[in-house]
Image (tube, grey):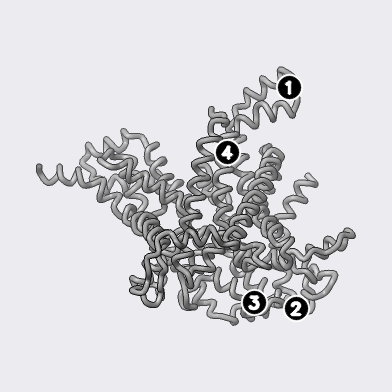
Amino acid sequence: MNKTRVWQKVRPYALVLPAMIGILLFVVYPILYLIKLSMFKYNLLNKDKSKFIGADNYTEIFSRGDFYNALTTTVLYTVGVVAVTMVLSLVIALWLNQNTRFNAIVQAGIFTPHIISIVSIALVWMWLMEPNYGLLNFALKAIGLPALPWLQSSSTSLLSVIIVSVWQNVGYYSLLIVAALKNIPQTIYEAAALDNASKFKVFYKITLPMISPQLFFILVIMTIGSFKVFDTVKIMTGGGPNGSTTTLVYYIYEFRTNSIGYASATGVVLMAIITVLTFIYFRLLSKKVHYQ
Amino acid sequence: MFWKAVVLMGFIFPFLWMISTSLQTFEETMTFPPTWVPSSPQWSNFVEAMSSGPFLTYFKNSVIVTTSIIVLQLAVMIPAAYAFAQYRFFGNKILFGMVLLAFMIPGQVTFIPVYLMLADAGMIKSLWPQILPFMSNAFGIFLLRQYFMQIPQEIIESARLDNASEFKIIWKIMIPMSMPAISTVALFSFVSHWNDYFWPLVMTDSEAVRPLTMGIAMLRETEGISNWHIIMAGNVVLVVPILIVYLFASRQIVKAFVYSGIK
């Protein structure tokens, strides 16, 4: 074979090589390394003292109350965020679907929080939720309701974090739904209008099935996204009070320096959960979704 | 119209309130009912916020990290996307499967091993741990490949007939014709890495390499929990650059995020 032919064979590999190095080094290898770490009692200061302990970290995980607390908190957070964001963004999308100038402004406005750093969002909301001088309690008192402790009490802290997440993301998801709505052919609606179908029926029989692939997709990315929640918790509550906002990633974060093996094992569990969730979604739900 | 305006306010107001607080005196933040418009704007709050830590360093780090990530991603992503779009080669499906895997596995799962790796490589005191892990942007490769596949094959074939090298085809045809997609990916990268908090938090252990987001988040520790006027002043500094970019490129940014959601 001459030089040009060899080059032609090698060329595609040369072009994808840098990308593959990045993925191997920072995705594939870390996954394997994570699994290995999860089977060790790892000694950060003296690596030779690290001890292989097999599945002990996993046995420990599933026997500890604080792990189940973190798991429950994450599930509650996920269910809350996904359900509320889904309904609200669908309502807002239908409401702002017409192409008017004002709608475009409102859409741009409610999308704004999504591109602002979570640090800013968290700080602004902590200030709004401040128990004595915060605006939210001022508003509650102004309409004759009792003030809430928001982030300071374990009974309201998770709810407060959920409110912030919904507020930050609802604009983004409603934009995704608006994009889906725009793809529905107008002729279907015209046919329905000829049949004198009620508004509710049009929504239930046409709109909803037509955008179900996108809704399903949003459901998947939102669930997986919610399972990774960390930033709001770290800044706003530090996992508290009393562990009421300690989510899985925050739990891993807390163990990251002192018990690397245990934290890694929890990381593997999180990865397994995310994989299983994706799988279940695509297996079970995709059958019920209408594809064009 | 009225209710739409109310909803709009619900999303804009917290930012207005942030700006108002950043210009109030400490006493004004502690009055009940609240002060809506500061009696005399306290610009000194900004000076105080910015002098409570090495903010120039934080800012510089944010700029260096964000630009390096974008440049590195473009250099890595464009050739890879071109290869996946143009050639069929042995193992291309497996390699593309790895790109999808990279898309699925979040940093929140792998940050411990990545940290140990980079610490072993002696990089923790540098900015590399905030840059290198993002060199392969899986979403970008995916999006650009789709885009490259839509470019008419005739154009590429005729360039080849004219003996143009593949490098020249990428440089003179693919890149100029895919500018919308390329700028979309770059803008998306800019916004997400400028705003990132988790990754620098777990990858840094000294002030010298921290970005602006961490500096602002730490204001609460240096300023205590009640100096909200100073904390909000710092917060304005973090938010305003993004808001300005959003004002000028809102359509592009929205497109970038909608793309990343739909694909």
> Is A138 or B48 nearer to us in this picture?
A138
Q: Amino acid at mark 3?
A: Phe
Residue B81 point in image, percent of width and height: 35, 46
Residue A199 point in image, percent of width and height: 74, 28
The residue at the point 72 percent across, 77 percent down is: B226
Which one is closest to the eye, mark 4 or mark 3?
A: 4
Q: Secondary structure at mark 2?
A: loop
Q: Which residue is mark 1?
A: A197
Q: Which residue is mark 4?
A: A216
Q: Is residue B199 visible?
A: yes
In three-dimensional space, the C-alpha distance between marks 1 and 4, rounded to whole angstroms, equals: 26 Å
Cβ atoms under marks 3 and 2 closer than 8 Å: no
Q: Residues within 10 Å of mark 4 (few under 14, many from 20)?
A: some
Task: Describe residue A227's horizontal placement relative to residue A80 as left or right.
Answer: left
The residue at the point 69 percent across, 30 percent down is: A203
Q: Quadrant of the N terminus of chain A?
A: top left
In three-dimensional space, the C-alpha distance between marks 3 and 2, rounded to whole angstroms, equals: 12 Å
Q: Residues within 10 Å of mark 2 (few under 14, many from 20)?
A: many
